Image: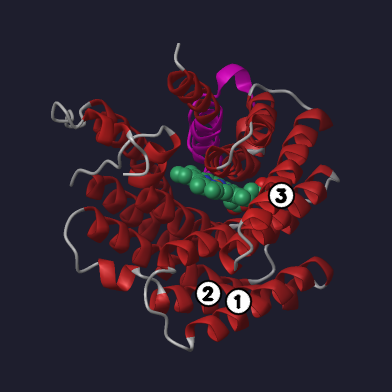
Amino acid sequence: MNAVLKDRVGRVAVLLLGMSSLVAGVWGGLVRLPLNLPLPANNANWITFHGPLMVCGFLGTLIGLERAVGLRGYWTYAAPVLTGAGAVMVLSGMMGHVPHLLITVGSVLFWIVTLRVVKLQPVPFTMLMSAGALTWAVGNVCWWADWPVYRVVPWWIAFLALTIVGERLDLSRFQKQSRWSQPLLWIALVIFGAGLVLSAIIQIPGERLLGLGMLALAIWLGRFDIARRSVRQPGLPRFMALALLIGYAWLALSGLLLILFSPLSSGLRYDAILHSFFVGFVFSMIFAHAPVIFPAVLTLMPIFTPRFYVHVALLEAGLLLRVAGDLASAQGLRQWGAILSAIAVAVFLLNTVSAFVFRPQPVKGKAKVAASPSS
Ligand code: HEM
């Protein structure tokens, strides 16, 4: 087996670790709605650990893998392998502190990986991503120390929000910046960071400030992100930009709901705040970036077909129904909305895999160019 193929097989294996958490997490979430669905061997971990499976097992592993691919050195893969393996232990029904510990150690290692990236490239976007990794590790230490999930959630929100803002800064850095862009971003980040830290000490004022920070970041992204321009271009740029702009609207709504309905604890409002962030903002970002990120991880060219609009439309429509159902205490609406979102995830996986399988074959003589990730 040549080196490129060997690397690809290893990456696909780590990707599958993360994907297993996605499947178990979404299934467990549906049962938790509640929907009357079977669970493998009555394994209640899929329900109890729905949140950790989605955030740490799926997203953390995927982001850790993406970062490891960008760096030389096999040690960087230890982070996604540990978080993915810990999550697989959770979903296979294992109890106790060992799986939590693996996930926590994996996230600390991931933070160290991001510090290495900062050392190589000491610029604001790498620092922001590293701050995001640190908040994930802090949240996981608290989770491992038996904090309830709803107190850990602000740290997980910070992990994903800072990582995504960092990624967007990276991708927007070649466009001409307004002189207000940087100072306004720092103001939003200071509000967000202060809210996060305060939320661990005095929950309600802290969470309200965090919500304000989320709202400020959403407005900043909506105003200064390159998506506002690329939405006018056809094909993949427009697809990505539309999904991004919709995601920013969900981030704003989630921040607003957190300001209005703090404290985070449980129930319908909790569901609305969390999922407008995790499904609306984070999954819109994943759907937007997937045509570029998955191929990059596998060292292939970007993929795009207009079919990708189907999974975005299903996700957004489902979430609209779900959040409306949450806010109006309409259980049926909420359940149908969540089912639509789960279908959107399945269609997304199908569309992505089929786009890889049925990708246009490179013209003879250009095969080398098509296989290169940098082209
Ligand atoms: C179709 C997809 C999904 C369904 C059906 C679903 C369902 C649920 C339900 C019913 C709850 C309980 C809410 C409550 O306490 O009243 C919940 C909580 C939660 N969900 Fe989801 N969810 C989905 C997607 C996601 C995604 C994509 C993420 C993260 C990326 C996520 C993260 C969380 C977290 C962190 C919690 C809090 C868990 C806790 O307090 O123990 N969910 N979800």
Mark sitting earlier along the chain (2/3): 3
Q: How is the image coloured?
A: secondary structure
Mark sitting earlier along the chain (1/3): 3
Q: Nearer the viewer, residue 310 or 222?
A: 222
Q: Is residue 316 left or right of residue 28?
A: left
Badge 3 is on which residue? 111
Q: Is residue 44 left or right of residue 171?
A: right
Instruction: Assess whether mark 3 and mark 1 are in contact (beta carbons under 8 angstroms).
Output: no
Mark-to-mark CA distance, 2 and 1? 6 Å
Q: Is the residue 249 above or below the residue 83 in the image? A: below
Percent from the top left, x then y, of residue 265? Answer: 69, 59
Helix, strand or loop status at disc 2: helix
Q: Is the residue 198 above or below the residue 40 in the image? A: below
Percent from the top left, x then y, of residue 117? Answer: 63, 52
Mark 2 vs mark 3: give the one in front: 3
Q: Characterize the magenta stretch by its predominant secondary structure.
A: helix
Mark-to-mark CA distance, 2 and 3? 22 Å
Q: Look at the image and say whether residue 66 sits in the magenta stretch.
A: no
Q: Residues within 10 Å of mark 2 (few under 14, many from 20)?
A: many
Badge 1 is on which residue? 213
Give the residue at x 20% y 69%.
Answer: 232
Q: Tag on residue 217?
A: 2
Instruction: Assess whether mark 1 and mark 2 are in contact (beta carbons under 8 angstroms).
Output: yes
Q: Nearer the viewer, residue 97 or 226?
A: 226
Magenta stretch, residue numbers: 17-44
Amino acid bearing label 1: Gly
Q: Is residue 38 left or right of residue 87?
A: left
Q: Look at the image and say whether residue 39 sits in the magenta stretch.
A: yes
Percent from the top left, x then y, of residue 149? Answer: 72, 50
